[in-house]
Image (cartoon, rainbow, N blue to C red):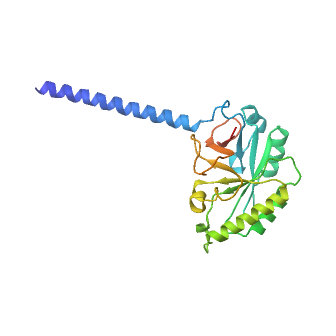
Amino acid sequence: MARTTKKARRWRARIIGALVLFALLAGGWWWWETRTFRPAEDAYPDQGAFVSAESGAVEFPVLHAIGADFVYLLATSGADGEDPAFARDYAAARAAGLQVGVVHVFDPCRLADGQSANFVTTVPRGQAMLPPAIALTKTGEECDPQVGDAQVESELMTFINQIEMHVGKPVILKVSPEFEDRYTIAARLERQLWLTRDRFAPTYGGRPWLLWSANHALPTQAADEPLEWVVVQP
């Protein structure tokens, strides 16, 4: 009887060990698969990256060689922020043969006039660039004092109009899930959408998107730090 009990315990321990090992292996595989995920090029032929100073040194010819057709560069933030790598990366990306677009991070705590002044003095006019993108991540709840929803939306619309006058083309709205949850802006502004969701195609915009950040931190040979990998809706 005692032998049977000991034997049963050993088998239970082996089974539990095997299950734990399987869970660890499956978790490791999923982590690696998610970390290195890039949508298949046959499904999304046009692919690229979003780059800022936080990306570190970027070798744009290498980025082009590993499958990027375009790059979006962080240019400005709010009324007085300018990405320190923008001018360098802009020249290097164009020299590498990449299509280039720029991103402004909208600050709901600041008026549109100051933000558009920052943008137009930083981003060259009349260049053959992709449509600019406005990153919408912060909400008025973060402001001190807080800013009402109506004011945030009013200033955003003013900023959009000012930027479109400067560049001569419609902007793209790079909307985060948090911003969309707060303002449901995607359904009410008739602009192309840039949405974000690792590995799985995003649906929170409520309508078709143009750009998808499919991996927010893809390791590549082209940069010191992982890059936000972006694809275009075919």
> Picture quarter containing residue 20?
top left
* Whether residue 105 is visible: yes
Query: Relative to the observer, which residue lies in front, 104 or 62?
Result: 104
- Which quadrant of the structure image shows residue 66? top right
Classify residue 37 as left or right of residue 59.
left
Residue 124 lies, in percent from the top left, at 86, 54
Drawn side of residue 29 relative to residue 214, left or right: left
Tell which residue pokes out farthest to the bottom in this image. Answer: 145
Q: Where residue 189 sits: x, y (%)?
A: 69, 58
Residue 36, percent from left and from top: 59, 35
Left or right: 24, with 218 as reference point:
left
Q: Residue at x 60, y 57 (%)?
A: 180
Q: Is residue 72 left or right of residue 144?
A: right
Q: Residue furthest left?
A: 1
Counting the numbered discs, the total is 0
Q: Position of residue 75 (x, y in %)?
A: 76, 54
Q: Residue at x 54, y 35 (%)?
A: 32
Looking at the image, residue 23 lies above or below residue 129: above
Q: Nearer the viewer, residue 67 or 60?
A: 67
| Image quarter of the C terminus | top right
